Amino acid sequence: MYQENDLEKIDIHAEPPIEEPARQYYFMAKCRKWVKGFEQRNGRLPKSCVLNFGCQMNARDSEKLRGILREMGYAEASEEQADFIIFNTCTVRENANTRVYGRLGQLKPQKKKNPHMMIGLCGCMMQEPEVVEKLKKSYRFVDIIFGTHNIFKFAELVATRLESDRTVIEDTDQIVEDLPNERKYTFKSGINIMFGCNNFCSYCIVPYVRGRERSRDPKAIVREIEKLVADGVSEVMLLGQNVNSYGKTLDTPMTFAQLLREIEKIEGLHRIRFMTSHPKDLSDELIEVMADSKKICKHLHLPVQSGSTNILTKMNRKYTKEQYLNLVEKIRRAVPDISLTTDIIVGFPGETEEDFEETLDVVRKVRYDSAFTFIYSKRTGTPAAVMEDQIPEDVIKNRFDRLLKEVQAIAAETCAVHEGTVKEALVEDICDHDSEMVTGRLSNNLLVHFRGGKELIGTYVDVELSECRGFYYIGAMR
Ligand code: 5AD
Ligand code: SF4
């Protein structure tokens, strides 16, 4: 394992090492030399800003980028102040792409004014060849382009860019362990347990941009969590596109439930979360581990996507409405106080009013604690994009509004059920709107705001949930 001050000892005039992560530390040392030169010439450190557009996996990647920038010596700054701006992009829905092009357009004048300015683009959108082609042609002021598979190579790409004036574009595929990262919170952290997805849901671009499923070595995962715990972390979020199929591709296969059992043993670790779960792979063994565990949080994110078996088949989800509802019943029987959340897509090609009613029916039967609702977005290259019967916008909008109303009303009711109870909260932050209040996260993933000071941040406290405000609580410390 590398220590921070090891960078000073690296001979940057020697040839770069071939093996990883030594190679990346070599390039970090090289960039650090450049940063020092910048400081001498300009009387200040260069400033960087990593902007995250995507999901929890992206947020975790952004922490890695910030960690590498910190090692290089960059100071952090806002987008307006930064000399090096990195957009960590998402491409799950088309409007995410449109937003990035818009933001890039706005950056062009900023880059003209600031001679030091560099722009880096990474994340899922950069795994799309058409996007890279478009950027090469119409956005030539971008300095570095790299996909999700190459986050680990960031230092090398920056060093290469600093030595030439050409856009650096990278696309390879490897998992590299033991690189630095800059965590947003000192007491909780995301951990990638796997990358990619093999499910090919017919609407989804993720398997094309994130590649095939690769699980990390369980020993490396446990080692990483042990180190985090020694560093003050007490809550971890295990991340993967479909954590329920963890371990299938390992040399010695193991199940996600077995991995959880190993993580449960880590002393000093207080809470374990994970996402996302695919209903088709959620095993009885996992339900059993969740029921037994003292550390796994009482929350399961279980995307349903649609309530209609007909649409689910077209989506290639590999479960029926009944199978999903039976699964929910089984989970609730084993873990009665579990909070369930979901993802739902409205307006998938061919969705009839009856199909949509089935979705509403599932929402009413499951009574989710919250749900992310999405308007279907056509992604070129996916099977759904060429399906007949794309739904008109006004019909989708109408269904979307009805769904949202239903979801919100039910969420408010399920939230109110816990009013008056006392629950344990991990204090995360001072409230934005009141500096004498703090925000804590409950095991079921809901937030509670209560009177308290910053000394509570990172600690667990018992809080009475006095009043439900729809999707969070106002409480008081007990
Ligand atoms: N259109 C709309 N929503 C989508 N999702 C994935 N692909 C699409 C798409 N093409 C949603 C799914 C998934 C969540 C992360 O994003 O609901 O669970
Ligand atoms: Fe996309 Fe389906 Fe994989 Fe989730 S499981 S990332 S929705 S293909």
Image (cartoon, grey):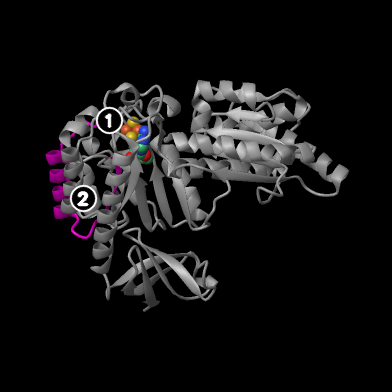
In percent of width and height, residue 16 lies at 69, 25
Q: Name the residue under label 2.
A: 363
348 and 199: which is toward the camera: 348
Q: Quadrant of the N terminus?
A: top right
SS for dot 2: helix
302 and 378: which is toward the camera: 378
Can residue 297 be seen here? Answer: yes
- Indicate whether 103 appears above or below 149: below
136 and 376: which is toward the camera: 376
Res 349 label: 1
Can residue 277 be seen here? Answer: no
Inspect the magenta stretch and tell me whether residue 323 lies in it: yes
Q: Is residue 34 left or right of residue 306?
A: right
Q: In this view, does 371 lie to the left or right of 453?
A: left
Q: In this view, does 173 lie to the left or right of 22?
A: left
Looking at the rendered structure, the number of numbered marks drawn on it comes to: 2
Kind of residue at badge 2: Val
The quarter holding residue 409 reads bottom left
In percent of width and height, residue 336 lies at 18, 58
